[in-house]
Structures are given as structure tokens and as C-alpha cells.
Image (cartoon, rainbow, N blue to C red):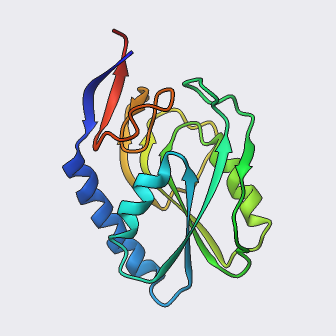
Amino acid sequence: MKVGRTVVSAEEIDAKLAEMGARITEDYRGKDVLMVGILKGAFMVMADLARHVDLPVEFDFMAVSSYGYATQTSGVVRILKDLDREIAGRHVLIVEDIVDSGLTLNYLIKNLRVRQPASLELAALLLKDGLQRVTLDVRYIGFEIPPDFVVGYGLDFEEKYRNLPFVAVMEEE
């Protein structure tokens, strides 16, 4: 496998995150916001998105597994790292790198809703067209992309390529 054509450039990502950050700033003004990044992929998205949010925000992380080393979700979700703080009464914004089948996020949202946050919303840099197996209300979407397997900007193939500043398709050699 090799990195192929660019799907979303570094410049496009930065511009979209600035736009998303401005919307989040307006929507959450005066609220106690906790951004929850889903590791490992969302760490870059969350860091850069947060720099465009003009509010004091707190951060926490969760790690879940539904892929292992596969390129498609297994549908079986395991929480590998839970939140460090309580979210009851908090305005929680889940930050994801990509939404494809939606199965993992659907499980995660149900898990977090039980903890009674004041609100629970979802921001994702990428949404893969046509792969959703459950309906998710993604409030902040960066880009809709074709259902290709992509890497870069936090997304990996066998733990590699997360450091690319753009998103590209993985292709057969």
C-alpha cells in the first residue's frame, strides 16, 4: 500500500477548521465546554480545531477500538480509555477525525448520554459518503469524502501516516 492522491489539502483543512471553530464559538458562548477527542485519530483535529475556538474549553480523551488492524470496523466496540472527569451537567463536544459506518460513535454517544451531560454534540473533520449504517446527527462536519480508505491528519494505516498534513487515499502498489 502507498499514499495516493490528496483528497483534502492542508490549506483546505485549516480553512474548514477555522470555519467550524467560529461556529462552535458562537454556539457555545457562555457555556462550560468540554471537548472530548477520540484517540488516536482525533488528536490533530482537536488540537487545531481548539485553536480556532475563541472560548475557554477543557479537554478530555477517550480511546475506543473497533478496527484493530483492519480497514473496516468490526462493529464490536471496546473502551480502551475512559474519560478522566465527570460530564454530568457539562456541554460535551465529541471531536472525531472521521465518521464512516457510525457504529463506534453511536455506541459512544449512547454510553455518554447515560452520564447526563447538559448537551452532547459531534464534530468530525470527515464524513464518508454512503457508509453510514446508523443515523448520526453530526452538528459540525468538515468535508464529505468518497468511501475510499484515507490516511493523514491523524488517520492511519497500521499506525503510520498520521503525521501527514493532508488527507490522501491509500492505494495498492
Find the residue positioned furthest to the right: 114
* For residue 140, above or below residue 170: below
Residue 75 is left or right of residue 27, and the answer is: right
Q: Choose between 36 and 109: the one closer to the eye.
A: 36
Q: Position of residue 117 (x, y in %)?
A: 70, 74
Q: Position of residue 114 (x, y in %)?
A: 80, 65
Q: Position of residue 45 (x, y in %)?
A: 41, 55
The C terminus lies in which quarter of the figure?
top left
Residue at 34% x, 70% y: name it. 51
Q: Choose between 62 and 101: the one closer to the eye.
A: 62
Q: Quadrant of residue 21?
A: bottom left
Residue 130 is left or right of residue 22, and the answer is: right
* For residue 142, above or below residue 148: below
Q: Quadrant of residue 156?
A: top left
Residue at 25% x, 32% y: name it. 6
| Marker count (numbered) | 0
Find the residue positioned furthest to the top: 173
Residue at 39% x, 81% y: name it. 26
Residue 4 is left or right of residue 124, and the answer is: left
